[in-house]
Image: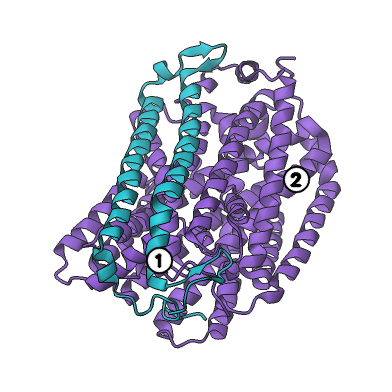
Chain colours: A cyan, B purple
């Protein structure tokens, strides 16, 4: 099975340019990009702001907040918090906004659905 | 309870050698049995490279965490925090935030478009031959750098545990580690290696959790008191502030930026991490595995913060630096201080297992890339059958294993996390621009991909060669020579933007245009998962 390109799959004879031009697919792409691009820019800016502060604002980062805990440690731990939060947010968004429409498009093209073990579920074979 | 004197007698470690060996042998025996059992059904290429796409999201997520939490994370970061204080924490943050790039931009799209290797995706809508070769070469280069780091970690650990400080003795142990690794991969393939990763990840996280709890208990679960202990032992309040390692000069500050850039952009371009996305049946499972691994990795890095400052407080930076194995010995020394020989034996066996498993994961990635991309698709021009391809992959494993052993013998003593950061820089420069462009930029062309990959790879490696890492400083690999023309020890800040620029320039100057039908196919497949949403059936 080493070199089967993508040939033996259900999508071999699909006109992908036609699918690409459908409103449904355009909507899926818009939803995907309108979430991941701004989010990627946001977390990268926040990360680099943190790196720059740690690099060039040592006095500020060394300010004690509580006991021996300083601003640097708090901001560092907030990086953890924001990473976990964005992860959760993305999963929530994909489950609600991306997966249903992707499944719909796939279903229309393949004419059948697979469960997570790869067995065909319902629908007619092409 | 504060400021327990640093009472770790390094010479007492030799007495624990037999116990350490026993625990380690037990681990090897158990995992070998699992690898044997897992490998019974290895028949096809999909079995060998992608474990038959049979793993669930949470299993694969644990395995990804296992791949990612290498000796660099455990030994390297703990050591970096113990010695350099806050600046070591930077590694944890960069290594973790980087997962968002993988989660949001790469993992699912890649799972939907490829089959076995990174080159499958990169060459999907571009000219097969040149792009595949470039992707395979950069995969091999990144794996090699990463392997060097792991082998250096193995050397450090051994010298500490067995008190072997002579060159020949360490070399012998590295050979044994390498031989074991070759056996895992030859017998187990991806399925066997994945199971080893899962077990090892759970042991590593459990071990770190126990140590973290223990350290916190000593300080009455008061983080501030723990930090105070670190300050007291180090006699330097600056261990809590940024800049202890990187704040010395303008150059070192720039180096810190460069490291930060390489860390955050490297993960999503690491071939052995990317390959893990193919071991799950669907994109949704790929997403689940990334989410699972983000949680495991994040929690683990919170542990290393406590362990690092714990080692700084309880063991002391001077004792750590003076021990055989140097910086990388902070975590094992802390284990010895807390739980004596038994905990040291357990933690060391886990660290060993970590190195073995990660090296196995890297080796199988490199072998798959050579057999699948270079042999099957370029040399045999797609005419090789699956059995031949797997045979080539197995032979490649042996060759890479031997190269890793040789590299490991010569790369000794450097901080493992630091060496891994170099692999991240190479990956981010050589692979990430092309991955991002080919997934998101419709006009991207073959010339752009080839310029970006070779330009990024060559600039990253050349800058490392002419950096203080290799020559010109006391800590260099070749301390006697001085050809360090480039002042930074991490090349990322130059080579990553350069690779993005080259990809753009190569595309704009390319007179050829790529087939729009292939672009449409890639985009539709990547977002919807058509044709990829099933296990490979036999």
User: Is label 1 in a helix, a strand or a loop?
Assistant: helix
Return the residue found at the far front: A123
Q: Residue B345 — which label? A: none
Q: Residues within 10 Å of mark 1 (few under 14, many from 20)?
A: many
Q: Which residue is mark 2?
A: B161
From the viewer's perspective, is the residue at label 2 or at label 1 nearer? 1
Q: Number of marks in the image?
A: 2
| Residue B449 visible (yes or no) | yes
**What is the C-alpha distance between the residues marked 2 and 1?**
55 Å
Tell me where residue B147 sits by quadrant.
Answer: bottom right
Please, is residue B153 above or below residue A119 in the view? above
Q: Nearer the viewer, residue B298 or B212?
A: B298
Relative image position of residue B105 (x, y in whole percent): 38, 51
Task: Report if the CB atoms under discs 2 and 1 are less than 8 Å apart.
Answer: no
When asked about the image quadrant of residue B195, the answer is bottom right
Q: Is residue B470 visible?
A: no
Q: Position of residue B186 (x, y in %)?
A: 65, 72
Residue at (41, 20) in percent of width and height = A58
- What is the quadrant of the C terminus of chain B in the image? bottom right
In the picture provided, is B398 more to the left or to the right than A83? right
Q: Is residue B405 above or below residue B329?
A: below
Mark 2 residue element: helix
The x and y percentages for residue B421 are: 47, 46
Residue B452 location (% of width, % of height): 29, 59
Q: Is residue B374 left or right of residue B538?
A: left
Instruction: For mark 1, name the chain.
Output: A
Give the residue at mark 1: A106
**Do the residues marked 2 and 1 share a common chain?**
no
């Amino acid at each position: 099975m080493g070199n089967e390109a993508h040939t033996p799959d259900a999508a071999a004879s699909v006109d992908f340019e036609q699918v690409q031009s459908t409103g449904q697919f355009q909507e899926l792409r818009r939803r995907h990009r309108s979430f991941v691009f701004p989010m990627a820019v946001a977390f990268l800016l926040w990360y680099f702001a943190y790196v720059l502060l740690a690099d060039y604002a040592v006095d500020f980062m060394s300010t004690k907040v509580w006991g021996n805990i300083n601003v640097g440690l708090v901001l560092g731990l907030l990086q953890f918090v924001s990473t976990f939060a964005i992860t959760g947010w993305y999963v929530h968004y994909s489950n609600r906004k991306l997966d249903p429409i992707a499944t719909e498009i796939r279903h229309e093209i393949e004419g059948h659905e697979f469960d997570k073990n790869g067995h065909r579920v319902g629908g007619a074979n092409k | 309870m504060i400021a327990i004197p640093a009472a770790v007698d390094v010479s007492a470690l030799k007495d624990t050698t037999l116990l350490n060996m026993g625990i380690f042998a037990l681990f090897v025996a158990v995992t070998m049995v699992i690898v044997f059992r897992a490998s019974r059904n290895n028949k096809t290429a999909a079995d060998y490279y992608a474990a038959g796409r049979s793993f669930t999201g949470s299993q694969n997520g644990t395995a990804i965490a296992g791949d990612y939490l290498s000796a660099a994370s455990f030994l390297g970061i703990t050591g970096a925090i113990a010695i350099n204080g806050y600046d070591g924490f930077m590694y944890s943050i960069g290594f973790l935030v980087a997962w968002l790039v993988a989660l949001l931009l790469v993992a699912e799209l890649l799972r939907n478009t490829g089959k076995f290797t990174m080159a499958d995706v990169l060459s999907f809508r571009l000219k097969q031959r040149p792009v595949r070769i470039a992707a395979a070469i950069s995969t091999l280069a990144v794996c090699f750098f990463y392997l060097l780091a792991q082998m250096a970690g193995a050397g450090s650990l051994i010298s500490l545990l067995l008190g072997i400080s002579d060159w020949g003795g360490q070399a012998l142990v590295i050979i044994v580690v390498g031989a074991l690794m070759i056996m895992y991969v030859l017998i187990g393939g991806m399925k066997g290696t994945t199971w080893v990763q899962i077990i090892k990840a759970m042991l590593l996280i459990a071990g770190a959790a126990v140590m973290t709890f223990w350290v916190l208990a000593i300080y009455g679960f008061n983080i501030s008191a723990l930090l105070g202990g670190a300050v007291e032992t180090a006699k330097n309040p600056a261990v809590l502030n940024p800049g202890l390692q990187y704040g010395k000069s303008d150059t070192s500050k720039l180096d810190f930026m460069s490291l930060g850039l390489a860390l955050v952009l490297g993960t999503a371009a690491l071939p052995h991490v990317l390959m893990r996305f193919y071991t799950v049946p669907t994109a949704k499972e790929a997403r689940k595995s990334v989410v699972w691994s983000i949680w495991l990795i994040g929690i683990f890095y919170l542990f290393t913060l406590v362990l690092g400052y714990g080692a700084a407080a309880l063991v002391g930076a001077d004792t750590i630096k003076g021990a055989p194995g140097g910086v990388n010995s902070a975590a094992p020394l802390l284990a010895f201080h807390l739980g004596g020989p038994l905990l040291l034996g357990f933690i060391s066996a886990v660290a060993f297992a970590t190195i073995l498993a990660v090296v196995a994961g890297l080796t199988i990635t490199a072998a798959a890339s050579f057999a699948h991309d270079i042999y099957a698709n370029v040399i045999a021009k797609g005419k090789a059958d699956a059995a031949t391809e797997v045979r080539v992959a197995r032979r490649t494993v042996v060759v890479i294993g031997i190269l890793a052993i040789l590299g490991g013998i010569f790369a000794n003593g450097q901080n493992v996390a630091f060496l891994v950061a170099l692999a991240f820089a190479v990956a981010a420069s050589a692979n990430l621009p092309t991955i991002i462009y080919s997934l998101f930029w419709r006009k991207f062309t073959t010339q752009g991909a080839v310029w970006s990959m070779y330009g990024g790879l060559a600039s990253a490696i050349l800058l490392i060669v002419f950096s203080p890492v290799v020559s010109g400083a006391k800590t260099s690999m070749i301390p006697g020579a001085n050809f360090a023309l480039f002042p930074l020890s991490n090349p990322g800040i130059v080579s990553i933007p350069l690779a993005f620029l080259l990809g753009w320039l190569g595309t704009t100057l390319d007179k050829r245009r790529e087939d729009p039908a292939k672009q449409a196919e890639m985009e539709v497949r990547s977002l919807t998962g058509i044709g990829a949403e099933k296990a490979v059936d036999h």
